[in-house]
Image (cartoon, rainbow, N blue to C red):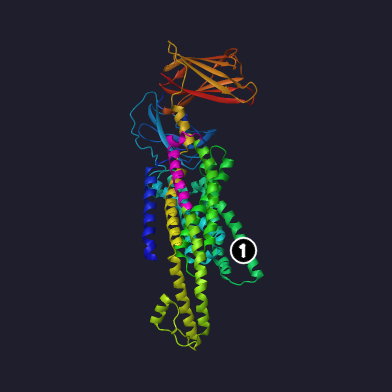
Amino acid sequence: MTRTITPRLRTLVLLLLAVTGVLFAGAAPASAHAALTGSDPAQGVVVDRAPTQISLTFSEQVALGDNSLRVLDPKGKPVQSGRPANVSGTTYAVRLHAGLADGTYTVAYQVVSADSHPVAGAYTFSIGAPSRTVVSDTGAGAGGGPVGLLYAVGRYLSYAGFIVLAGGAAFVLACWRQGAGVRALQRLVVGGWLTLTAATLGLLLLRGSYTSSGRLGDVLDLDLLGQVLQTKTGAALVSRLLLLAAAALFVAVLFGAYARREEEEGADGDAAAERRDLGFGLAIGGVVVGAGLAASWAMAEHASTGLQPGVAMPVDILHLLAVACWFGGLTALLVALYRAPADIPLGTDAVRRFSRLAFGSVLALVATGAYQSWRQLGSWSAFTDTRYGQLLLVKLGLVAVMVGLAWISRRWTGRLADGSAAEEASGAAEDAPQAEAEEQAPLATVPSGAAVAEAGETGPTAEQEAPADPGRAAQLARQRAAVETARRKRVRDADPGRAGLRRSVLAEAGVALVLLAVTTALTQTEPGRTEQEARAATAPAASSPADTSGALTLDMPFDTGGKNGKGLVRIDLDPARVGANEMHLYVQRPDGSPYDIPEVKVALTLKAKRIGPLPVAPEHITTGHWAADGVQVPMAGDWEVAVTVRTSDIDQVTVSKNAQIG
């Protein structure tokens, strides 16, 4: 049997390594899920006087370290003073030394987004006049290099360990209770626990270097480890380790006391009730521990930020548990089909129970996956236009293949059930006269080795007579039991239904390995919704044709949601060129009449160059008309013009369009 399975397992392992390498090698070093939306001073500008601080604004909250914001002079020396701090909302600043000389300065940032991924970048500005700078390496190595690769492998192993641990235990408790005493299943589940524990410890040690320097030498830096423990991701990893301690107790009881009670036959009513109570307690405890382990991912990654985190995190937990029941149970079923001993055969009832469990898991995956896809993509076009959507399409295709293979497995299960029923009927007919003959035969001598070998092929012979010595009789009984076990195993393995089920389940497991690699890559990829929003901010938008003077006109409908909250904002920018411009802003009701509102604000942002938002405060001229003189546009580009309209104390909305200025 070992010679038969080893090449197949070796092929699966090589396939897993190849797919993992391709997916991780093709990933960007740092999947930026938070974007820099503004800075002061802005990128590329020349200021007359040295600023007292540098401030950066991101699209979401980020986590800062001591060296998250650095400012380097033309010679590459740091000129920031103290630690960076959050000054307001998503804006962060660091103070500068006084008396900075003229020249070009480099601002380097390295932060961690709210969904745990590192974000790094750099830009320059000048004081007085631009100059040459020696800065070439800003140290933005977060998320890349050997540490990034090790971290990605650690994430994959942690998912795999959780799936095997949770799914294997669920298979034993829900599908095949006798499997608690099967050594191969015990090794599988314990191996899942060991893999998840080792991967979690590795991620905890790698985390500091992964989000900062990216150097292997910093993996054992205790200061970095202390900083990691104060972050949301660090707390999630520590919580996972604590839950794994509870999982170890669960595994010990499952394969200890519970396995012994399942092996007991003919137990009285009290013992049977005690066994049921223990099984019920293990089921409840397993669900609680499994949900807690799944929550350690949900509370620190994509589900914890963005739209509807209060709904997304429970959905993500349910999704992970469904994946574990399906993939982990499938792995346990594969092990049982190949490694279950002949005296504890895997019955068709267990296979059917797993089929129902897998079907329920697929339904849960469809429901939770649909919600997650809407939340992370937001539009149909994101399926093909973003890396996240493309990976999700690959994942959906692999799931469809697995469902097809599962349907084939269900058909083999039906044939296996029919074959088992026929085998039981024929076996009973053959064993009846044999048992009668054995009862009438006297005990004599222990058979020779040749007789035992012959018995293994043809059944007990007339020469097999037990000795008068009780010891020799016990030896003969053991030999007969071994012969019978070998016969049952040979008959079981020759069953075409079981062989077909093995092949289909093995194919499912191979697809599951690839699917797990794709899923791991998805968790490290920027969601399609945010990627499309970033593209939309820099894409040209439709605008009214410019007049002969070069003026730009933008019409933007708005709806604040309150009473009289609908209308139209029209912006005229003249001459719409680099330098000073004159801006007129008109607000109209849906019928075209002028509309006075309590407040209106304008901001200009050139996201391609990370300039802005540049605020504009127009003055009220007359009913529905505001104006501002000297609106400075520092450089030509595709600018986002955002208008915030407030129609009451609580009703407010921001609308925007992009336009080429300059």
Looking at the image, residue 271 sits to the left or right of residue 185; the answer is right
Above or below — where is 357 with respect to 479?
Answer: above
- The answer to which image quadrant residue 592 occupies is top right
Q: Is the magenta stretch mostly helix, strand or loop?
A: helix
Whether 130 is among the magenta residues is no
Q: Nearer the viewer, residue 217 or 302?
A: 302
Residue 55 visible here: no
Instruction: Name the image quarter holding the N terminus.
Output: bottom left
Q: Residues within 10 Å of mark 1 (few under 14, many from 20)?
A: some
Whether 379 is among the magenta residues is yes
Above or below — where is 579 with respect to 141?
Answer: above
Q: Where is residue 486 in the image (x, y as percent from the top left)?
A: 44, 72
Tell me the residue that label 1 is attached to: 278
What is the span of residues highlighted in magenta in the rendered image? Answer: 378-407
Residue 388 visible here: yes
**Residue found 50% across the figure and 71% down from its top:** 427
Q: Where is residue 261 in the image (x, y as percent from the top left)?
A: 58, 68
Q: Which of 101 and 170 is in front in this view?
A: 170
Q: Nearer the viewer, residue 378 or 253?
A: 378
